[in-house]
Amino acid sequence: MPEISTDTTTPVERQEADEPRRRRRRRRDGPRTSDERSGVWYPRWYWPSFIAPGTIALIFLFVLPFYVVFSVAFGTVDFNNFGTAVPYYAPWWWSLHTFNTTLQQFYVGSHIYQAPLIRTFEYVIAASIICLVLGYAVAYYTARFATKYKGLILILLVSPFWISYLMRIYAWQGLLDTDGPINKVLTPFGFGHTNFLEGKPITIILGLVYGYIPFMILPIYASLDRIQESLLEAGRDLGGSGGQTFWRVTLPLSRPAILAGIVIVSLPMFGDYYTNDLLGSTKTAMFGNLISQQTEATAGSTRAASLVLILSVIVLIPMMYYLRETKRQMEQA
Amino acid sequence: MRHPKDISRRQFLTRAGGAAIAMPSLAAILAACSKPGTTSSGAAGDPLENIQIATLDAPVTLPLTQDPIAADTPIESGPLVLYNWADYIYKPIVANFEDKFGVDVQISTYNNLEEGIQKVVNGQISPDVFVPTPGYLRRLVAKDLLQPLNHDLIPNMSNVWPSYSNPGPYYDLNWHYSVPYTIYTWGVAYRRDRVDDAIAAQQGWEALWNPDYAGKISLYDSYGDTIAITILRNGSLDVNSQDPQVIEAAKEAILQTINDNDARLTINGVYAKLPAGDYTVAEAWSGDIVGAQWYLPKGVGTDVLGYWKPEDGKTMIGNDLLVIPKASQNPRLAHEFINFMLDEKQGTENFTQWNGYQPPFTSIQPESLVKDGIVPETLTSAVVTEDMFKKDLTPYELPAEADQIWLQAWTEIKAGA
């Protein structure tokens, strides 16, 4: 089908206007690409089409659903219909009423959401640090000393995923029970009959660490494994002790992986609700529990969506820091 | 030469076709842009305004939204989808039904009724038989989500206490939409090996606030139930209170026993965890404690289970319903299922073999239940009789504004504030 051009310039004018841009591009690109050398010609849309599936997935699986979350949060509920959500899809109808009252629950009046928010930060920070310390040690050993057992260790690290998370947490419920094995082991030390499942922060942190630590180990391992031995040898050659080489060579080189690991484990922890559902009580309710409770409650969907938006802003802060850091590192490299 | 702005016939057709596709979606977008609630629902003639909230003093006849299915409708081939509480039906009874009609029954479960209602209303699940409480019936009918029952297809209704069909229960006179599934009271379940009967009776609801049982106290993770029994504990009999101060006091009391006594919010606390010894005292539906005898560890006698309920006139009493949603794919089969559950043999077996929840059958004699060993002697108080429905307290549907006060209190409890 012939394209209808609304351009009023003549072909010659267009060519002239394009000329400097073309020249600039050629100069900047440096050596000619293999495409140009082999004389293969690709239509303009060819390479961009490669990101089309990703873009479409992003639009349908993220942008649109997120817009619906906005529409629900800034919409209302129909009390005549069991309090189901009535989303306002058109931005000019958006009402901030529920969002504001939800936000105020964090700091005004009886501020009932403040405690869970603080708790969430405490648990996530503690669990992330434990994940980092334990995960780094395991990754370091695997990358540097495991030699022929490397594959085996990696398989063992991934093997828990063969069993459903739910089943594994049920196993923890049995282990941590008042009459369970862990309490039996602790009895000689005077800690017997500790009710770990009665809303103990330590249990929740344990659950979070247990659930997310593989996601910390794998990126750090990948990064440590890639550090060239010659760099470490150079560090020792220049008079550094083992410790100094670690601080000045290994650790800085694995910094991007540490940041990535922290982001990968902490972001989902902020929204985690099942760990507390299964191992905790209302005393250890986290942000995710607030959301899950509102989605089930009558007329709660507007509040649930508002909480989702608030959580998004909260996790945006570490995300932005991560992006800035990685950008800076790329510029340095 | 043709002017470039001219459109060829082919282009015109393509574009017209495109427009034809785009128009309906444009209409949908425009519809989405108008302020919802102002156009469709909420207009005058809202069916909800025409049906009052049902109470014993003001019984309600629910309007018929359509005709019941014809009695000669052929029986569908299933599968029948039953949407029910978890662990609330004896599986062999379901197998009997499958054998009799040569169909499959799929059981989906919910952990609390709010979740179940939300999924039915949103159409996330479209069951053939659903198990709500009377408090939701009015709204389900007003939203045209249920279909009326054809009484000719449920002859076994004659097994049920006559008051359920003539004149019918206060929430559904002439039983247009519902049959009763089970009846139960609210009380305190306790371990008799740890709490003496006399002491349990003396404490009453207060047992759930007793620091002696710290860490071994269970409350239901269900806002309507737990707030209502706390109102009773606080000394009021208004289990349908709309007074913010009464609800606030109940909230404070619940938070206090959670914070000071490690009380837990559970749903299987009575029937599974109490027999296992995890809890000493628990807020209980009477059917849960009767069902608990089948969860006892080997070698533990049923006499460890005890149940206390308040004196006559101060007990809360209720029943669950079987209804057929309008969206049911197997309405005739659903009628058969309801009729099957009201069958004397099947319904009684469901109660006495595992479920523990009593159906309101005339054939079930409260005295013989204990004598025949179906209900352990120590749980005599868990047996429900017909006259209790006349003198005891009934939880009703709350008006939306009051319901929000209850929910807000519950939100605060669940946030662990």
Image (tube, coloured by chain):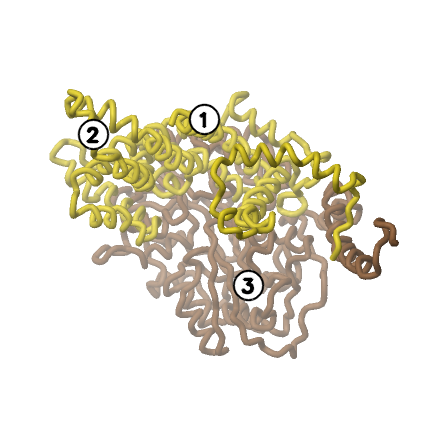
Image position of A219 with respect to A325: above or below: below
Q: Is residue A326 left or right of residue B298?
A: right
Separation of marks 3 and 1 at Cα, in angstroms: 55 Å
Q: Give the secondary structure at mark 3.
A: strand
Image position of B108 with respect to A217: above or below: below
- Tell me the chain of label 3: B
Q: Amino acid at mark 3?
A: Val
Say which quadrant the C terminus of chain B sits in: top left
Percent across and percent down for residue A149 are 17, 47
Chain A colour? yellow
Q: Circle 2 sits on which residue?
A: A232
Separation of marks 1 and 2 at Cα, in angstroms: 28 Å
Percent across and percent down for residue B323 are 58, 61
Image position of B135 with respect to B322: above or below: above
Q: Earlier in the sequence, mark 1 or mark 2?
A: 2
Name the residue rendered at 65%, 51% in the picture. B139
Separation of marks 3 and 2 at Cα, in angstroms: 69 Å
Q: Amino acid at mark 1?
A: Arg
Query: Which mark is drawn over residue A324?
Result: 1
Quarter of the image for residue B67 reads bottom right
Name the residue rendered at 23%, 44% in the picture. A175
Rendered brown, the chain in question is B
Q: Can you tell which of label 3 and label 2 is closer to the viewer?
A: 2
Q: Residues within 10 Å of mark 3 (few under 14, many from 20)?
A: many
Q: Along the line of sight, which residue is nearer the eye, A224 or B358?
A: A224
Say which quadrant the N terminus of chain B sits in: bottom right
Q: Along the line of sight, which residue is nearer the eye, B268 or B382?
A: B268
User: Taking the image as drawn, is residue B410 in sight?
Assistant: no
Query: Which mark is drawn over residue B129?
Result: 3
Q: Residues within 10 Å of mark 2 (few under 14, many from 20)?
A: some
Determine if marks 1 and 2 fall on one subunit. yes
